[in-house]
Amino acid sequence: MAALLLGESSVLERNNAHLSVFIQSKQRGDSVRKVFLSTFFLVSVSVCASIGQQTSQSKPGRDASHDMSHAVAPSSGMKDMPGMDADISGPAMHSMENHHMDMGPHMKMTTLRAPKAGDEERAQSVVAAARQVTEKYKDYRTALADGFKIFLPNVPQKMYHFTNYKYAFEAAFTFNPDHPTSLLYEKQGDDYKLVGVMYTAPKRYNENDLDKRIPLSIAQWHEHVNLCMPPADRNREALGPKFGLHGSIATQADCDANGGTFHPIVFNWMVHLYPLEKTEAEIWDVARGAGHNHAD
């Protein structure tokens, strides 16, 4: 366990070093900066969750909510973890930005299911917990004091993620709606307004696993898929137009033909929830996520 945590720390430190380099690139154009911001954030969350899954897989006697024996495994040679492979962390992987849901072949959404008995009650219990969380952390300083870390506070963003990496780690084991991976704030002058929360789940979960956390008749989880990364000496091409999560390449065959490295699944599953909204449609609004930028 200690070795895993040291490995997590090492990856985050390496990505922090890459971050400094890319922030400087803002002077050469905002597109590079924008693409990097959201990717680095998700890399950090994914690393923490990956440590959790590796640990959980070694524990006997898991209950059904923890069991991933029936989960759909990635078909690639990526490491067996819900985060991401080490070779796509850092500056080679700066291609996820802007419209979260409007990414065509690079975005996978869960299918809305027909409602079944108990779904609405389960979803309402998650919303109720999320509302309590938002009440507790209405003042962003309370969130900071409780271990949430703001992602790039000095970089202008439409929505700021305050992430608790302990909760990201926990999400690899089980679902606790009192412990969202991230709190979502909008900047208002010198203050922050809390508007929502983000929950995560291991990328190897199938839709039945996700349905146990939040019913799929009400919520849609999403994950980022079909990523083709350019050769190491052409990292900048991860911004497109061929490579990266905005690139035209979305199959193993096309990626191989262009000398890239293909990753069918990249990040953890995630879902945004806006518990302060009035209607169910607004609370679970996928389109609101589509308009969400990590930096704009």
Image (spheres, rainbow, N blue to C red):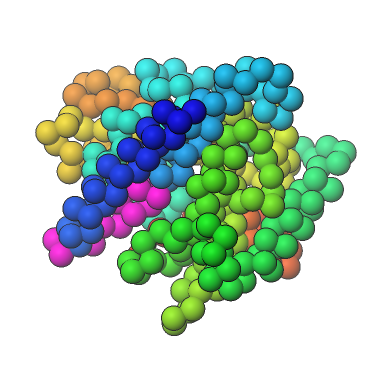
Q: Which corner quadrant holds the C terminus?
A: bottom left
- Residue 123 placement (x, y as % from top left): 76, 48
Extreme right residue here?
117
Residue at the image point whose x is 69% and y is 49% from the top: 177
Residue at the image point whose x is 17% and y is 43% from the top: 236
Q: Is residue 88 above or below residue 21?
A: above
> Image quarter for residue 8?
top left
Residue at the image point whose x is 32% and y is 25% from the top: 262
Q: Is residue 272 above or below residue 11?
A: below
> Image quarter for residue 11?
top left
Please tell me whether residue 32 belongs to the stretch shown in magenta.
Answer: yes
Q: Is residue 253 above or below residue 198?
A: above
Please tell me whether residue 287 belongs to the stretch shown in magenta.
Answer: no
Q: Is residue 11 above or below residue 180?
A: above
Residue in the foreground of this view, choosing between 223 and 8: 8
Q: Which residues are magenta?
A: 27-41
Residue at the image point whose x is 30% and y is 34% from the top: 88
Question: Does residue 219 appear left or right of residue 159 in this picture?
Answer: right
